[in-house]
Amino acid sequence: MLEIQAAVARTPSGPFTIEAVQISGPRDDEVLVKIAGVGLCHTDIVFKDQFVPYPLPAVLGHEGAGVVEAIGTNVHGVAVGDRVVLGFSSCGTCPRCDEGLPSYCRTFVPLNYAGQRLDDGSTALAGGDESIASHFFGQSSFASHAIVRQRNVVKVGDTKADLALLGPLGCGFQTGAGGIMRSLACPAGSSLAVFGGGPVGLAAVMGAVIQGCSIIVLVEPVAARRDIALSLGATHVIDPSVEDVTAAIRSIIAQGIDFAFDTTGNIGVIDAAMASLGSHGAIGLVGVPKNADASIAVNIAQVMTFGHRIIGIIEGDSDPQTFIPELLQHHDEGRFPFDSLIKTFPLSQINQAIADQARGDCVKAVLIPDT
Ligand SMILES: [Zn+2]
Ligand SMILES: [Zn+2]
């Protein structure tokens, strides 16, 4: 048992509270990581607010990075002192994991969302006699330390980027970049419109530049974020609060775009994106909707006639063990400046960071534990 600092979610829609809690030592297949920094992701908030039922109190956080402090007896290939990024959990043995698509692991949902160990229902965290849900995305990293499963751990070698800022590569940035580079696999010369200029959308813009897309449109109401997109290599930006989005896209490319990428989960936005697709166009959906039962309507004849494809995407179809090192290589060679999108806050200011990120004052918040 170790006493650690953590941001605890106690009530839906309530603030996080900074508390001293106890964390158990690593079991045979677990790793104890001292967190250097953890990204704040929209998914943390929607789970706290019970988008789907989630056990509270809980320590959330799923974009951690840090240094390995202890390992279980069955952990191999990871050593104390290793610098690591924490990805999502997957089993490593099902058919989806075997084909390199661990974000569609057949036990993805319980491994990432159960808030406990699956073998005996225990949690790694406690506040005195009170059990606190752990293992969110296999990590629960809104804390100074996290107990994670071995498969969550991605070792990072030497990189020019600051270790404390690497955590969002394990979710938001890999989702955006992977959505373009893996899921949609946009070829060089293709056209793309990205809907929403948050961390996922801006990572998608960077991914599109890496792929060599010739038209990269960002649709985003916040002017500062449109400016960032242009600086990252977007060729066009559209302000949906003053422009008809579909008409604006068709004025850029009359026959419609090859690819659309929705990070908003907003039905009206997805309808506009679908209406912007050209022949054999594909739309990738990564935005979590406000309500878990939100649905879009598609015109069957339209989808068939134009060969449109609608693709749901989790984590950019990434295998973190290979994709995170690949993104760091792009970063170090100047093609993936993800760290320029990050603003840091002390973990104790998590509620302030949430407010700033919601207002659009910062693109991506990373929380730094105080201890
Ligand atoms: Zn699996
Ligand atoms: Zn996330």
Image (cartoon, rainbow, N blue to C red):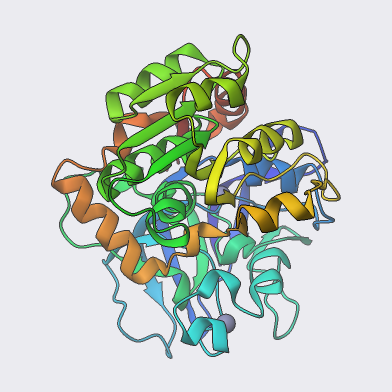
Q: Is residue 55 left or right of residue 40?
A: right
Pick the front one: 350 or 97: 97
Q: Position of residue 206 (x, y in %)?
A: 33, 40
Quadrant where the C terminus sits is top left
Image quarter of residue 304: bottom right
Work out which residue is located at the far top of the displayed protein and give it: 242
Pick the front one: 86 or 335: 335
Total labels: the figure holds: 0
Q: Position of residue 220 (x, y in %)?
A: 53, 23
Q: Is residue 168 left or right of residue 80?
A: right
User: Which residue is rendered at x = 58% and y = 46% of the image?
Assistant: 6
Image quarter of residue 264: top right
User: Which residue is rendered at x = 40% and y = 41% of the image?
Assistant: 191
Q: Position of residue 248 (x, y in %)?
A: 53, 20
User: Which residue is rendered at x = 40% and y = 49% of the image?
Assistant: 177
User: Which residue is rendered at x = 83% and y = 43% of the image?
Assistant: 291
Pick the front one: 254 or 170: 254
Q: Is residue 147 left or right of residue 19?
A: left
Work out which residue is located at the far front of the displayed protein and give it: 305
Pick the front one: 299 or 228: 299
- On screen, residue 235 above or below 313: above
Q: Is residue 272 left or right of residue 238?
A: right
The answer to whether residue 35 is visible is: no
Q: Position of residue 228 (x, y in %)?
A: 36, 22
The answer to whether residue 314 is visible is: yes
- On screen, residue 331 above or below 73: above
Quadrant where the N terminus sits is bottom right
